[in-house]
Amino acid sequence: MRDKISQLFCLQKNACKNNSADNRGHNVPTKATSNGTGTMCTNGSLGTEGPEATETDSSGTGRMRKPLERNGSTQNDTVHLERRLGLFSGVALIVGTMIGSGIFVSPSGLLIRTGSVGVSFIIWLACGLLSLLGALAYAELGTMNTSSGAEWAYFMDAYGPAPAFLFSWVSTLVLKPSQMAIICLSFAQYAVEAFVTECDPPRGVVKMVALVAIVMILFVNCYSVNLGMAVQNVFTAAKLVAVLIVICGGAWKLFQGNTQHLSNAFNGPMPNIGAIATAFYTGLWAYDGWNNLNYVTEEIKNPSKNLPRSIIIGIPLVTLCYALINISYLAAMSEQEMIESEAVAVTFGNRILGALAWLMPLSVTVSTFGSANGTLFAAGRLCFAASREGHLLDILSYVHVRRLTPAPGLIFHSLIASAMVLHGTIDSLIDFFSFTAWIFYGGAMLALIVMRYTKPNYPRPYKVPIIIPVVVLVISVYLVAAPIFETPRIEYLYALLFIFAGLIFYVPFVKLGMTPRFMNKVTLFFQLLLEVVPTSSMAMFE
């Protein structure tokens, strides 16, 4: 134990010596020097092509932005996250996170809220288009500021620390953990149903299986970034096979002439404005994850190219899959049967696959497990980025000294998700998540518009027409406001109060910099327990 403690302190001490210039601040420029191979380096990092090599800071003053991570690190470099995600991994993270439990849980809920097959299908397509437009706007933001953390980093650039803190406060404590809890509950529901056929699976067993899934995913992501992405890639491929099975089964039923459930798609009354908004919540939940790649931009190879390419490939692919899956469901089941089924995909498998019906619950569990893996992978980076700037506990910004994974942030998110699994249900979590999330999605769109005017000369390797963020912003306002005016619920007020309650912690602990004396000992204890150290992009110990 003493040897481990000595190694950790020696590493910090050497890091302080090797990075004494860094203690002047994150955006202080340093003189570029040659690395001996003809490539110029800034702040000790090997040169890279494109805007990653010479970024200006978020103030728009033209100062050099210190790269938050480096390629080609050597043994003497300070511990930092590495760029390991290429185009295929980026697409796998988007597709693997988006195709999770939503398409297997949401179809019945969306039909209930619209009361029409045709309207629900239009909303499915509209949700895909909205996700694509939002993701394209995020691509501009992500190539402007290649820091991890997505909305948190963009709020810092556009609005300053207070709104950024409120986002990290809500997202870390509610949004990301609830997203993972929903997915793991869906995973457990389908996994248990494979063994319990004559009755509903016991709720306690479902929650225990969900907790086991969280622990397994946590271990994978804490052990290795490469292992986490390998799991993501494999499970993404597996879920695309499952999607193909559903689509082929539906095509076979349509070939047999089973089109009666599609012929009268627009029968029934039109839903009101509030019902459409809540139906969008259900559909958008199935598409959620379109912005997850922006949380890990510090680990993407050449993000100015691979970030928008991954989005342009991944989201249309998911939209196409969802449209074909819904048609396949309706080729095998009626609208009422879909509404009454708690496991639409399993019911579909029983109708189509016969003796191979067990493939559907297996496919769904594979899909949801992969989605949960991608969700935790991204969530840990948000915690890491916000904590690095002092918006959360310092220990959450540390990375493992050998495995280079943000283990404390991953563990923190997993603990909160586990608490939500024990307490919540899928439907209540989806409604709360969707309402709160779109407040911040709209804030990100406004941030892009604001920075078009406040930072007009800021490098933009990828730029979208201004109409795109404007349209997404207007839709975001509608999605937030329509349910409040149409069907007011006390939960919406609770959500807003929770967001602004973050100011109670922001003012003393972030704005005024107050720190309880015992926190240093707590940080040191967990640092030694978890074998984690600060990264190169945060101020080191004196």
Image (cartoon, rainbow, N blue to C red):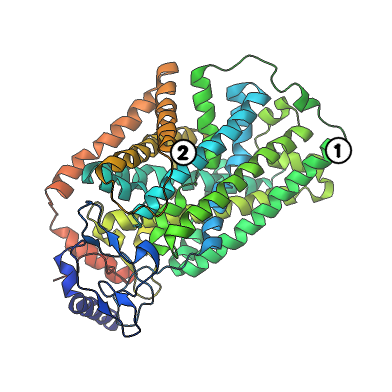
Which residue reaches farthest bottom?
36
- How far apart are the two marked residues, 1 and 2, measured between alpha carbons? 42 Å
Sequence-wise, which precedes: disc 1 or disc 2? 1
Question: Circle 1 is placed at which residue position?
Answer: 255
Give, as a three-letter code, the residue at label 1: Phe
Question: Can residue 422 be seen by looking at this rendering?
Answer: no
Which residue reaches farthest right?
256
Image location (x, y in percent) of residue 207: 53, 46
Q: Observer-nearest residue: 272 or 30?
A: 30
Q: Which residue is drawn at the image coordinates 44% and 28% (left, top)?
A: 479
Instruction: From this view, report whether residue 537 is shown above or below residue 180.
Output: below
Q: Observer-nearest residue: 10 or 23?
A: 23
Image location (x, y in percent) of residue 224: 46, 69
Question: Circle 2 is placed at which residue position?
Answer: 424
The image quarter in which residue 336 lies: top right
- In the image, is 438 to the left or to the right of 91? left
Q: Foreground mark, 1 or 2?
A: 1
Question: Can residue 296 be seen by looking at this rendering?
Answer: yes
* Disc 2, SS: loop
Instruction: From this view, report whether residue 538 is shown above or below residue 412.
Output: below
Q: Which residue is drawn at the image coordinates 69% and 40% (left, top)?
A: 325
Q: Which residue is drawn at the image coordinates 16% and 74% (left, top)?
A: 20
Q: Which residue is drawn at the image coordinates 26% and 46% (left, top)?
A: 455
Image location (x, y in percent) of residue 437: 41, 38
The image quarter in which residue 523 lies: bottom left
- Viewport quadrant of the N terminus: bottom left
Image location (x, y in percent) of residue 503: 21, 39
Which residue reaches farthest top?
269
Instruction: From this view, report whether residue 167 is shown above or below residue 459.
Output: above
* Disc 1, SS: helix
The image quarter in which residue 43 lies: bottom left
